[in-house]
Image (spheres, rainbow, N blue to C red):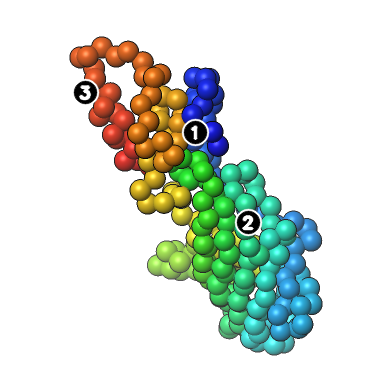
Amino acid sequence: MQTLLKTSSEACSKISILETYHLRPLLFTTTNNSSIIDLKRGGKKMNWKVELSEIEKKKRFFLEGIFEKDGIELDVGFCRFLEPVQVKMVVAKTKDGFTVGGYVHTAIEHPCARCLEPARVEISGVIEALYLPESMRKNVKEEKLESLKNIIYYHETEFDLSERIIEAIVVAVPEKVLCKPDCKGLCPYCGANLNEEPDHKCDKIPVVDSRFEILAELKNKLKNEEV
């Protein structure tokens, strides 16, 4: 990234990207050929689909391996995976359905919320869900509604557990990513990176009526506190 943008239009474009970044959601999806490398089977690739009959037969089983980062696509172009996703998961039969629990770990590259420079983010997420037959939905008592966000009702006999992995990753991504805690961000007038130019004095500051200077300073202060 250039230390100083040459034109005001370039600066506006960069600042606009920063504003858009704060507004757009972070979404992940898996590709059709998503697979896990099972560490316990000598690196043999497996998919994430599990049959209900297998769950009922085994009652409880473990999945441990590395989910290839190429098996995950980002719905927005602001970040990318730096490492494969390490997964440990246990599936256990219950009286009425089954539970899925475990954790994921990976690392992503994400734009800093202040300066837009790429920052490495370590991701550690928790997998936790209860699967119940669709027929039980009406039987859930009203006092249990608080836990509905962790309940997934099903009517099929095959389950793609990769959805739970993606869920855990998304939840673990910080709302605001910083390249460093004291990141100084961008010059609001020309877009210069203030980390690279700590003594930057912008020559593109618009002339402001002195009566409004105090309000302008307050506005900039509040804007910096938000990020």
Q: Nearer the viewer, residue 126 or 49?
A: 126
Give the percent coordinates (x, y) of residue 106.
58, 64
Q: Are marks 2 and 1 in contact (CB under 8 Å)?
A: no
Answer above or below: position of 5 versus 227.
above
Q: Is residue 73 above or below residue 143?
A: above
Nearest to the eye among marks 3 and 1: give it: 1
- When asked about the image quadrant of residue 154, the answer is bottom right
Provide residue 68's location: percent of width, then percent of height. 71, 64
> Is there any visible trace of residue 137 in the rendered image?
no
SS at circle 1? loop
Q: Residue at x 42, y 64 (%)?
A: 146
- Which residue is more in the foreground, 204 or 107? 204
Crowding around mark 3 (Cα neighbors within 10 Å: few <14, some 14 to 19, many 20+) is few
Report helix, strand or loop for mark 3: helix
Frontmost residue, 165 versus 2: 2
Secondary structure category for the residue under label 2? strand
Picture layout, residue 26 above or below residue 218: below
Q: Amino acid at mark 3?
A: Ile
Q: Is residue 21 left or right of residue 66?
A: left
Name the residue carrying label 2.
Answer: 81
Pointer 3 with pointer 1, Cβ within 8 A:
no
What number is the disc on residue 3? 1
User: Mark 2 or 1 closer to N-term?
Assistant: 1
Q: Amino acid at mark 2?
A: Phe
Confirm or deny contact between disc 3 and disc 2 (CB under 8 A).
Answer: no
Query: Which residue was labeled with disc 3?
Result: 214
